Image: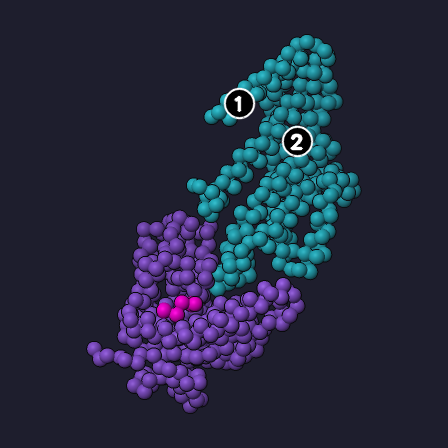
Chain colours: A purple, B cyan
Amino acid sequence: MTPLPNLLSHPARHRSTLGATALAMPQLEGLDHQAVVLPKVSLRQISLSYRTNSGERLTALENINLEVRRGEFLCIVGPSGCGKSTLLHLIAGLHQQTSGSVSVDGEAVHGTGTDRILIFQELGLFPWLTVRQNIEFGLKMKGVPKRERESRVRQYLRLVHLSNFENSYTHQLSGGMRQRVALARALATEPDVLLMDEPFAALDAQTRDLLHDELERIWSETGCTVIFVTHNVREAVRLGDRVVLLTFRPGQVKREYVVDLPRPRHIEETDVASTARDILGCLREEINKSLEAEYSHEKNR
Amino acid sequence: MKKTAKQIVFYAILLGVWALVAKLRIWPPYLFPTPWGVGEALWAGFADHSFWIGILVTMKRMLIGYSLSVLLGMGLGLAIGSSKLLEDTVGGLLVSLQALPSICWIPLAILWFGLSEKAILFVVLMGSLLSVTIAMEDGRKQMPKIYSMAGRNLGARGFRLFWSVLLPASLPYIVSGLKQGWAFGWRSLIQAEMIFLSLGLGQLLMMGRDLSDMSQVIAVMILIVALGYIVDGLVFKTIERRLQQRWGLAPA
């Protein structure tokens, strides 16, 4: 294996890549490239503002431009309050942006659609359904016939190693198992785009490491596009092909990093750690801003 | 077990005191019957089928009236819970209507429907509708938003979103309201039957009065309490317990 001394491309303005990896990056800026490779998901000048209860206008997201290529694993990191979860909700069609457009395969998104499935931070598993019924839910809504539903549920139960728990209710499972149910429920509908909102934040380190491995395996098997939001930079580097850093309120794309480390990776690897450290340096500025904002908010009260 | 023992002792003492007072003949037996007199009345009532018929007629009315109120109340409550405009207008009206004892609907029901089955059902409906509606409205608001979002995200919309997600998600929040609706409906029904005098337990109660048969009056009262207790305490408690187990809110 050739040593990769400079694994992280230091960003200039918006995006830069190492010379050697530039070829691996499709659709650079410029319209002529887009005609060749249509991005799977593209966000154009997305802004979102809303009125808070106290009446002031808050800009959550400002002029976000992002393109995600088919089959890419994109991670979004940022301080809390940068609107990264909101961004996923917009892509999922659960909320409407104030301006700009979200498109999938070149077509503008209106409302929810089973081509884009979001795994919520709180998971949102249905406690009145068993594990099997939870996984089956999306298929039922899609109108998949019973026979096919059964075989697909079995397949995804196996994929997340939960075949023995199909008749359990979700409160009977551990955190990691619940997480896997959510993953299976999302995957069973066979979405093109999997949106994940800090899904592993509440888990212990060992469970999280295992789920990283499983997610990476499933992603490479299904070839779906993943947009993964996290506040954990190491996790982002562990998983992502690319890491996008958002600024503190209003959320803007601060930098993009291409992570060109060989897979499978491990979160404890020194390469992962050193790459993460570089990103973290940049993120810390934003975290400080968010802390300052919180502090001044408290002072003003 | 200890609780049951206490209860047995309590009721034994109660019966004993009752029998003793009746034996002392402070009041004539037609005003203060003996426990065994009431027991005989109960036996006779079931033997000549009049109690069976009364129970059947009353339960049938209750089931129909209550089902109607659950259907209507859920729709109404869901609508009010989902719309700020309806909440501020209709919601406020419903809360103020709660101050109206359901027996007050009887004159209106008689004028609208005459002395008919429909009038009785109307009174039952009005008795339980408000509780069910307000419970559903609260349930809709208290229900964590995540379930509705997750449902939409997985492709549920319209009626299926309501039936497969919103309704089951709000059940733990509305079940106590449903229970209260049943209890209010039950009271309204007996009251209505006492006035309409067309079969049912309410009529049996009034018949006891007309015949100056205190034993029958008390026997029917015991029946009304027993039926109310069975549904309230057993049926709804079971549903509540099952729900809590399923949701992991209580130890299985």
Closer to the observer: label 2 or label 1?
1
Indicate which disc, 2 or 1, sits on the residue closer to the N terminus: 1
| Image quadrant where residue A144 sits | bottom left
Residue occupied by mark 1: B6
Q: Is residue A231 magenta?
A: yes
* A94 is higher (above) or lower (below) than A37: above
Q: Toward the viewer: B79 or B4?
A: B4
| Image quadrant where residue A35 sits | bottom left
Q: Toward the viewer: A44 or A80?
A: A80
Question: Does residue A218 appear in the picture of this structure?
Answer: no
> Which residue is pictured at 33% across the width and 54% down the height?
A162
Residue occupied by mark 2: B200
> Which residue is pictured at 65% across the width and 60% down the height?
B83
Residue at the front extreme, as displayed: A299
Disc 1 packing (10 Å; few <14; some 14–19; many ≥20):
few
Disc 2 packing (10 Å; few <14; some 14–19; many ≥20):
many
> Which residue is pictured at 23% across the width and 79% down the height?
A3
Quadrant of the image for the N terminus of chain A? bottom left
